[in-house]
């Protein structure tokens, strides 16, 4: 028996928006599946690798919007916003805030020819192009909008490979990127002081552990370079001659929950040590890999990740990826044009998130059964999301302490397992006199208990 103790009267903090995603479920330019984002209350959509290779030749990327690098960045006619306008307008309809990556999509076939991943010829001009994009979406410039998009990320994974010839994201030195960041961040922050300017979508911190990813990432030298790049970047932008703003630092991980927790702590401690104590730490690419796509095992991992990372020093997460046809698109079935079980982990988490407050919940020794509790501001509604990532069933129980002056009145359960798809189940025992819930969690499952207090 795995036992938890939940205290709805003790607030552990405000729930953080961990259920962001990368991109959106594009089917050409059909919005048929976009409602799933709104239904799950997805808070952010990070726009990178949007529309496929090279941004589909149409979306988001600087080269797709400002097609002629010799054009005038102050002339609205120099920009092609058409497809990105459509995409962002559809996200806004679902109350999803874009998290806009300024730069280029990954060019996996760069060995044949690289197109848009070279350092800009003129960094100041590139910064002005970024300004034009921000003005279009936030200030109405060039027949634009006033969306108030807050997060603007300068490039993605410039640290992807230590050798320039091998790097599918940045055909320049690390110093070239540092200079691009310095010029662009200072220019944009001066122009838009109220916005969040940051970067650089780091490949991650695998080298701090004995992670098997070192072999998967071609060599330990590569993951050590990720760390070298990270610290050299922070040294550069904190030096008196190159001082630059960093409202958020974004990074990636394709590892286990346990390792991701350690990476989150490492990122926070490092940022603080360089004086960036107010800089947000944002994990905006994470996934266990495409091999489990569409399975309950993948769904349970995602649910566990959303819950476990709540207690780490990161501020936001964005799952990679919510596109339909991407290899790492674990939420949508590209054949049936519907959702995989993993999608319902986001639905379940959102029902907690809407309650706003994290309630105290004890953590048992077992690492493969994870629970997160929430309570509304008035104490009238509570919820617990519990995940079993084991390949066998687990018995769980919850001792529930009601909010001050209230009692437990009723409970319902939404189950995602082999027999339920985020559907109500009566396969649990609720004892309001003993303040207790118990159930048998099937293998690779997650149950959301919603508890009314009177």
Image (cartoon, rainbow, N blue to C red):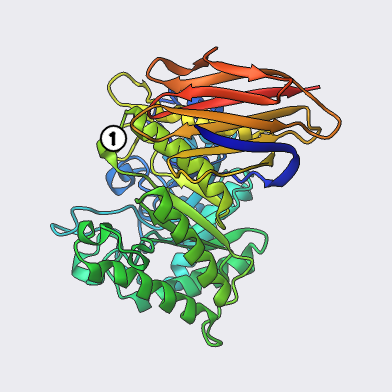
Quick one: 19 or 175, which is closer to the camera?
19
Instruction: Name the spot of residue 403 as percent of width and height, x first.
Output: 79, 33
Residue 82 visible in the current orientation = no
Q: Is residue 285 above or below residue 209?
A: above
Residue 386 visible in the current orientation = yes
State left or right for residue 36 relative to residue 168.
right
Instruction: Name the spot of residue 49 as percent of width and height, x first.
Output: 35, 47
State left or right for residue 61 relative to residue 118.
right
Q: Is residue 66 above or below residue 126?
A: above
Residue at left 48%, top 63%?
A: 199
Residue situated furthest right in the rendering: 405
Residue situated furthest top in the rendering: 426
Q: Is residue 296 above or below residue 65?
A: above
Q: Secondary structure at mark 1?
A: helix
Quick one: 183 or 452, which is closer to the camera?
452
Q: Which residue is mark 1?
A: 292
Instruction: Name the spot of residue 320 as percent of width and height, x first.
Output: 39, 44
Residue at left 31%, top 45%?
A: 57
Residue at left 25%, top 38%?
A: 291
Q: How many marks?
A: 1
Classify residue 43 by image quadrant: top right
Residue at left 78%, top 27%?
A: 380
Residue situated furthest left in the rendering: 112
Classify residue 319 by image quadrant: top left
Q: For the C terminus, give its image quadrant.
A: top right
Q: Residues within 10 Å of mark 1 (few under 14, many from 20)?
A: some
């Amino acid at each position: 028996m795995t036992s938890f103790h939940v205290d709805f009267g003790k607030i552990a903090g405000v729930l953080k928006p961990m259920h962001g995603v990368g991109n959106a479920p594009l089917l050409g330019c059909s919005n048929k599946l976009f409602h799933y984002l709104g239904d799950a209350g997805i808070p952010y959509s990070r726009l990178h690798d949007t529309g496929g290779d090279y941004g589909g030749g149409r979306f988001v990327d600087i080269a797709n919007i400002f097609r002629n690098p010799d054009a005038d960045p102050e002339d609205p006619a120099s920009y092609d916003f058409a497809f990105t306008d459509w995409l962002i307008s559809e996200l806004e309809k679902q109350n999803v805030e874009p998290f806009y990556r300024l730069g280029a999509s990954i060019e996996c076939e760069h060995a044949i020819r690289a197109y848009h991943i070279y350092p800009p010829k003129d960094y100041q001009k590139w910064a002005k192009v970024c300004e034009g994009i921000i003005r279009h979406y936030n200030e109405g410039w060039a027949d634009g909008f006033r969306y108030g998009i807050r997060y603007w990320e300068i490039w993605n994974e410039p640290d992807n490979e230590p050798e320039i010839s091998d790097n599918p994201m940045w055909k320049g030195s690390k110093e070239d990127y540092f200079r691009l960041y310095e010029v662009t961040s200072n220019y944009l922050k001066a122009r838009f002081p109220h916005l969040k300017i940051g970067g650089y979508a780091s490949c991650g911190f695998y080298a701090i552990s004995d992670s098997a990813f070192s072999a998967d990432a071609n060599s330990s030298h590569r993951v050590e370079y990720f760390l070298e790049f990270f610290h050299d970047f922070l040294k550069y932008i904190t030096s008196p001659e190159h001082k630059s703003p960093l409202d958020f630092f974004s990074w990636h991980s394709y590892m286990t929950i346990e390792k991701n927790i350690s990476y989150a702590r490492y990122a926070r401690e490092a940022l603080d040590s360089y004086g960036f104590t107010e800089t947000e730490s944002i994990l905006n690419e994470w996934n266990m890999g495409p091999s489990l796509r569409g399975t309950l095992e993948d769904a349970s991992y995602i649910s566990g990740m959303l819950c476990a990372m709540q207690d780490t020093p990161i501020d936001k997460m964005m799952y990679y990826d919510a596109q339909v046809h991407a290899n790492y698109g674990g939420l949508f079935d590209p054949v049936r044009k519907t959702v995989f079980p993993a999608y319902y982990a986001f639905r379940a988490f959102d029902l907690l998130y809407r309650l706003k407050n994290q309630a105290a919940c004890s953590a048992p020794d077992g690492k493969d059964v994870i629970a997160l509790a929430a309570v509304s501001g008035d104490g009238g509604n509570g919820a617990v999301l519990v995940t079993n990532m084991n390949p066998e069933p687990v018995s769980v129980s919850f001792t529930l302490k009601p909010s001050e002056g209230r009692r437990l009145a009723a409970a319902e359960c939404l189950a995602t397992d082999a027999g339920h798809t985020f559907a109500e189940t009566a396969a649990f025992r609720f004892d309001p006199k003993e303040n207790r819930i118990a159930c048998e969690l099937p293998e690779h499952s997650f149950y959301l208990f919603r508890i009314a207090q009177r």
